[in-house]
Amino acid sequence: MTATALIGAAEELAVFAAGGFGRRVLFDGNRMRAVLVALEPGQEIPIHAPDLDLVVSVLTGTGRLAAGGETRWVRAGDVAVIPAGAARGLRAEGGRLLALNVVSPPPSESDHAPQPEAAWPPLEPAPDVGSLIREEHRHLHAEVEELGELAELISRLDPEDGRARLQKAVRFLREGLLPHAQEEERSVYPAVERVLSVWGSATATMVADHRHIARLVESLAEVADRFLEEPDREQARRLLHALQTLVEVHLDEEETVYLPLLARLSPDERRALHAHLAGEEPAKKKEG
């Protein structure tokens, strides 16, 4: 029996196992046991129903928790209280999962016996939100490349032609790129934040990119309204190059860093986000 105080980082205390799930007993007393549970992707604590009270605190990762007669998607920061006799189980989905289980009274080996008739419900199919956004990025990339081409041409174009081309570029930036950025801040970034909530504002730098792009667009719009003397052409060239570079880097960061994380949202969350971005009404369905 361990009865001493313990303070430490969960990821350093965790013990993962190749077969079954990893567990480390942090406290074992007469009235309760505290266990740090470490699950690799796809590993689980089978559904069982001992006559013991249980508190589960998810520390890192995402997965599914069986509690009583329902199954819920959980992630870091979620807690559950499951009374004695109610079914319980935990399964890692989308990556490693760490959870702290506090059981009272301490369990015996027989208490861990899985229920023969209990099974995890299959995960319902959910759309790939990342592919939807990547397709929109593909169209944006084509327009952004034209900014660089216009930057190289601007000093040689007739003033009226140059002005018309700049105004066309501004229309794309105002009506295509900036609304895309605003929609990401409304829906996509909050979804990513839910996965990365343990680290705080993980998308703050991406929002800052949007603000900087918006300022560059307004500066370009001011130039596009002028007759385009030589200094105006040079300023337009610089702004177009800056926009092309910043937007291309920004889109690449989203696709390589953030979009893969959307796969870790629950199926219900992915369905709702996909429907919102596709302009559809999401079906109201409870995760099971």
Image (cartoon, rainbow, N blue to C red):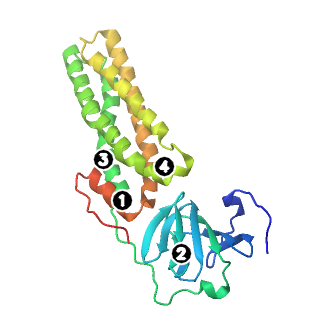
Check residue 195 in the rendering and tell me which mark sits there, or answer none: none
Q: Are marks 3 and 1 in contact (CB under 8 Å)?
A: no
- What residue would you read off at disc 1? 270
Residue at image location 41% in from the left, 47% down from the top? 190
Residue 108 is situated, as x and y percent measured from the top left of the image, at 67, 84
Residue at image location 66% in from the left, 81% down from the top? 107
Q: Earlier in the sequence, mark 1 or mark 2?
A: 2
Q: Are marks 1 and 2 in contact (CB under 8 Å)?
A: no
Left or right, 57 with reference to 288: right
Secondary element under disc 2, as helix, strand or loop, is loop
- What residue would you read off at disc 2? 83
- Whether residue 281 is visible to the viewer of this picture, yes or no, is yes
Secondary element under disc 4, as helix, strand or loop, is helix
Q: Earlier in the sequence, mark 3 or mark 4?
A: 3
Looking at the image, residue 253 lies above or below residue 91: above
Check residue 136 in the rendering and tell me which mark sits there, or answer none: 3
